[in-house]
Image: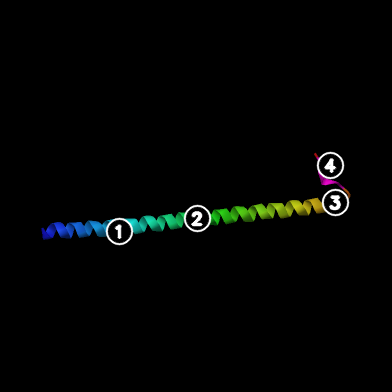
């Protein structure tokens, strides 16, 4: 009976450890996803900034960007 209690306690500790590891992996995945989202947002913002700069340069040159095909 004592041996069964010891084995059960050991299994519970192992399950708890596995649960902690899974939770850590989930946090890491969420962190990576957030980092990727932020990088995508930054890339999009940079693309918009460059497009706006190009449009302003074209206008300075007397070219209507809307008329370009």
Percent coordinates x, y for residue 40 in the rendering: 60, 52
Label 1 or label 2, whichever comes before in sequence order:
1
Q: Is residue 67 above or below residue 47?
A: above
Q: Residue furthest top?
A: 69
Q: Which mark, residue 59? A: 3
Q: Quadrant of residue 24?
A: bottom left
Label 4 or label 3, whichever comes before in sequence order:
3
Residue behind mark 2: 32
The image quadrant where one finds the N terminus is bottom left
Residue behind mark 4: 67
How dense is the environment of label 3, judged by Cα within 10 Å: few (below 14), some, or many (20 and up)?
Answer: few
How dense is the environment of label 4, judged by Cα within 10 Å: few (below 14), some, or many (20 and up)?
Answer: few
Q: Are the residues tagged 1 and 4 within 8 Å (C-beta)?
A: no
Task: Give the residues drawn in magenta, as a range.
Answer: 63-68
Q: Nearer the viewer, mark 1 or mark 2?
A: 1
Q: Which type of secondary structure does the marked residue at label 4 adopt? A: helix
Q: CA distance from mark 4 to mark 3?
A: 11 Å
| Residue shown at 28% from the left, 56% from the top | 15
Q: Are the residues tagged 4 and 3 within 8 Å (C-beta)?
A: no
Q: Nearer the viewer, mark 3 or mark 1?
A: 1
Q: Which mark, residue 16? A: 1
Q: CA distance from mark 1 to mark 2?
A: 24 Å
| Residue shown at 25% from the left, 58% from the top | 12
Q: CA distance from mark 3 to mark 1?
A: 64 Å
How dense is the environment of label 1, judged by Cα within 10 Å: few (below 14), some, or many (20 and up)?
Answer: few
Q: Which type of secondary structure does the marked residue at label 1 adopt? A: helix
């Amino acid at each position: 009976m004592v041996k069964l209690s010891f084995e059960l306690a050991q299994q519970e500790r192992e399950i708890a450890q596995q649960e902690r590891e899974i939770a850590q992996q989930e946090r890491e995945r969420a962190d990576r996803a957030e980092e990727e989202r932020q990088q995508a947002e930054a890339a999009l913002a940079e693309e918009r900034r460059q497009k706006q700069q190009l449009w302003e340069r074209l206008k300075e040159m007397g070219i209507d960007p809307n008329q370009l095909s």
